[in-house]
Every structure is written in structure tokens, then in C-alpha cells.
Amino acid sequence: MARRWCRLRTILICICTPCFCLALLIIYISVMISLTLNPHTSQGTTIVYYVGEINHFVAPGTLNKDGFSTIPKTFWEDNLKGSGLWNQFQKTIDRHFNPILNPNKAIDRSARSYFDDFLLNQGFSEVTVMDNMRNTFDNFPQEIQQFVTYMQRRDYPILIQPDGVCGAKARLEKKRPLLLFAIKTGEFNFKNRQAIRQTWGRAGWVAGEKRNGSNKEVLGGYVRRVFLIGKEDTGEMGAHVSDLLTMESKTYGDILQWDFKDTFFNLTLKDVLLWRWFSRHCNQVHFVLKGDDDVFVNTPKLITYLQEQLKKPQAKSTMEDFMVGDVIGAGMPNRVKKSKYFIPDTFYSGLYPMYAGGGGVVYSGLLAKRLHKISKTVHLFPIDDVYVGMCMYRLNALPVHHPAFLTFDFSEEEGQQLCIYHTILLVHKRTPEQLVSLWADLKKTWTQCQNVHLRGVDDKKVTQENLAKS
Ligand SMILES: *[C@@H]1O[C@H](CO)[C@@H](O)[C@H](O)[C@H]1NC(C)=O
Ligand SMILES: *[C@@H]1O[C@H](CO)[C@@H](O)[C@H](O)[C@H]1NC(C)=O
């Protein structure tokens, strides 16, 4: 009996094991086929890894998870229902480059070198033909309507540009330029520009705060400057204003003007077009500071800080992703109708990706070129610093928070301290008059405040705290 049973079992094993394996194989193949034929069925099957507090989405077998940086949860979600208009536009493109659905395309996304008009338009028309679209659009505030009407366009011609601002003096210079100041300003803000030119924004060779240990030479770097300007709605005065700007450009050679209306919701164009111009004409510069025309910058400290970054052992690879500023993690879109930042949830739903406040942010020239490429696959968004965050997010790069960037001000108490401006790299909201007097004070207190350090620099911890706060 026992023998018989034993034989039976051997037969069973011999027949069943292959059957079972074959069945598994068939199931596996059919799942793979259905995934390939219909990407929509993959909804909700994404694998989520938790690293620290942040979700990482990793397609099994396509990319290793260490290669991924933090990606907010909404990114790979494939759920068209109930999301804002912008999310819907962008979804078509993100799906196209999704590393889970299209592993090969996702890799050449950052390598593509032409503007993918076709894709952007496809995304646009797929969404705009939907029935409920008309209604959604009609309910937007006027500025958003205006934005949506023109959001497909970014090929605005350059009206004025500096004459070789990045290369002109290069032959006399021993090193690559260290820093480009790229300042958003309006045609009428001549006073702000003039104050910047005379104070922290001086171009040419600029001293840092350190000396060479062996020969006591002052260490510094070469600095460049451009002002980013659109067109003001000037009516009859138009011709007059543009003459003035042409003259200003001839005198200072630092005006970069494009032919689009200089409105709040058009500011993103300044980023996108700056990246394009930078990639063509200025790409030897190590760093870019993009900021408003009402910030104060402690240029000597900034120069030293940036030179230290370049000297770090892993500088070559960190420069690929280098962006530093006042970082806001997982911000909520402003839903207050009266605010100038108001974004209705029918236009954008969900949280913003992590971004650096637009008052002043520094990034590497390498990153500027990468942002230029990736921005061709990200629809314009009306708020410029958030848009930069959206592009960073699609590069799997993260801005780093540095407490010495104050896009909001000091407390009143702190403001009284003698050396307070020696503890910062940048502070927002100063008038042209203040820039001039602050700059003079900075020079006056230089020796006294020589050993004052920048505000806390434990970057990693601060970024985590920032994340936790929001
Ligand atoms: C400091 O000076 C020495 C001697 O002149 C020179 O070799 C060295 O490169 C300098 N260091 C820096 C950081 O410029
Ligand atoms: C942006 O600029 C274009 C070109 O001048 C203009 O037609 C459009 O209305 C502007 N968009 C917004 C939101 O102001």
C-alpha cells in the first residue's frame, strides 16, 4: 500500500509540477501583454517604496531605487478624474515619459534636444475637446483665462540682448565666470536696476570674503549680470519707453528683453527663456542667481560660499542637481480668491512639488541646461517658482534649503543687530534706497563682523524640518 502510494505521488509530482509551472507562466505572460496593450490597466498597481518620510515610485526592474530622489506622491498617479485642467494637460506628457509605462522614453526625456510641440499640443487638444471644459474655462478668473489662452506659446522673440555679456571679456580672464545675476525686473524699474548695478550686482571681478592662506591674495570670481524684462503695457508712451531701454542697454549691456506682456502670470516665461538664452550664450558660467529686483545680496559671502561648493570632493556630480534657496516643501496652492497667487482647484489640483521661493535662488549652470531641456516637456504654469519646482521634480532633483536665503524678512528684533546682514546670503523686499545704504553699511562693518558665520547650514536637517512643517 505504502509503495503504491509512493509511486502515485511520484507520478503526481512528475505531471503536476510542469503543469503548475506552465500555468504560472501563462498568467505572467497574459498580465504582461495586457499591461503593454493597455497602460490604463496599470492604475493602482504602482509599487511604492517608503524611504524616510517620502514616497518613491519605482518600476520593478527599470531603475534602481537609489537612483531616484524624492518624488511627491501625485506624480505617477494615473487618475484623470477630478483633477485640474493643468494636471490633465500635463498627464498626457507625463504618461508618455513615465518610467513605469515607457521605460525607454523616460530615459531619453532628459536627453531630448528639441521642443516637443506635437506632444504639448496633443495634450492640450485631448483635454480641450472634453464637454465640461468650456464650463471650467468660463469659471476661471480672467488672468487664468488669459494664461490658458496663451500657455501653448513660448517662442517669443528677443527684442534686446546683451552683446556677448558672458564671453566678451573672457580672453582677459583666467577662469570661467563664477556667477550670473539674472534679475527679473520691469521696464519702468530703472531705479531698482541702477541700485543693483551700484551695489551688490556689480559685474566684473568681484572679491569674496576670504584670502588665500599662503599669499594673502583676496579670493574672488568673475560675475555677470542680466536683467530679464518683458513688455510693459505703455499705450502711447510705448515708443518712448523702449527708446530709453535701448539706451540703457547700450550703456550697461545688461538688458535681456523679450516680446511678451510683462504680467505676473507671464513670469514663468522669463525662466524658460532665460534657460534657452543661457544654454546658447552663457553656458560657461558656474552658477546663476535668479531673483527679484528688490532683493539684497551679500555678494562677497555668496562668492565664497559658491567657491566652497565647487571645491567639495563630489562637486562634479552634485553640480548636476545643485539648487539652493528658501525651500518650501509640499506647499498648498493658494485658494483665496483675492490673492494674486490664487489658483482654483479646477485649474491645478493637489499639492505643489518642493520648490525654492522665487525671490532669490541659486543654481548651477549645468542644472540650468538640464532645466532648459526638461522644460520642453512641462506645460507652463502661472507661478514661476512653482514651475521651476515642477521641472526639478521631473529631473528627480531636489532644491536644498539654506537658512541664509530669506525670502521672508528677519524678525524686527534681529534686524537691529549690527552684523545681521553678514549672516545672510540674500534677503527679500528692500527699496533701491535701502539697497544703497545697506551696501554701504556692509562695507563699513566688514572688519567688525568679519568672523560672523552664515545662519545655520545643516542643510539636510533643515530640509527635513521644512518638510515636516508643511
Ligand atoms: C594660493 O596661493 C598659492 C601660491 O601663490 C597658489 O598656488 C594657490 O593656488 C592659491 N590658492 C587659491 C585657492 O587660489
Ligand atoms: C503673456 O504675454 C502674451 C504676449 O504678449 C499675451 O498675449 C498674454 O496675454 C500674456 N499672458 C498673461 C497671462 O498676461
Image: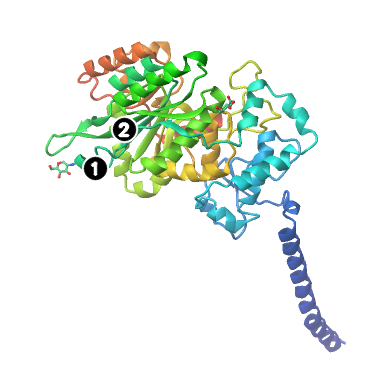
Which part of the image, by quadrant, shows the C terminus?
top right
Amino acid at dot 2: Arg
Amino acid at dot 1: Lys
Whether residue 4 is visible here, answered yes or no, is yes
On screen, residue 209 above or below 91? above
Label 1 sits on a secondary structure element that is loop
Q: Is mark 2 within 8 Å of ligand 1?
A: no
Q: In the image, which disc is placed on residue 224?
A: 2
Q: CA distance from mark 2 to mark 1?
A: 13 Å
Label 2 sits on a secondary structure element that is strand
Query: Where is residue 358 drawn, in percent x and y?
Result: 48, 27
Ligand 1, image quadrant it occupies: top left
Tell me the residue at 76%/79% (across/down).
18
Q: Is mark 1 within 8 Å of ligand 1?
A: no
102 left or right, relative to 270: right
Q: In the image, which disc is placed on residue 233?
A: none
Q: Earlier in the sequence, mark 2 or mark 1?
A: 1
Image quarter of residue 185: top left
Query: Where is residue 283 drawn, in percent x and y?
Result: 36, 43
Tell me the residue at 66%/21% (across/down).
142
Q: Residues within 10 Å of mark 1 (few under 14, many from 20)?
A: few
Whether residue 343 is visible here, answered yes or no, is no
Which part of the image, by quadrant, shows the N terminus?
bottom right
399 left or right, relative to 129: left
Query: Where is residue 210 drawn, in percent x and y?
Result: 21, 32
On screen, residue 272 above or below 20? above
Q: Which residue is mark 1?
A: 175
Front residue (pair 47, 331): 331
18 left or right, relative to 374: right
Q: Residues within 10 Å of mark 2 (few under 14, many from 20)?
A: many
Tell me the residue at 50%/16% (across/down).
234
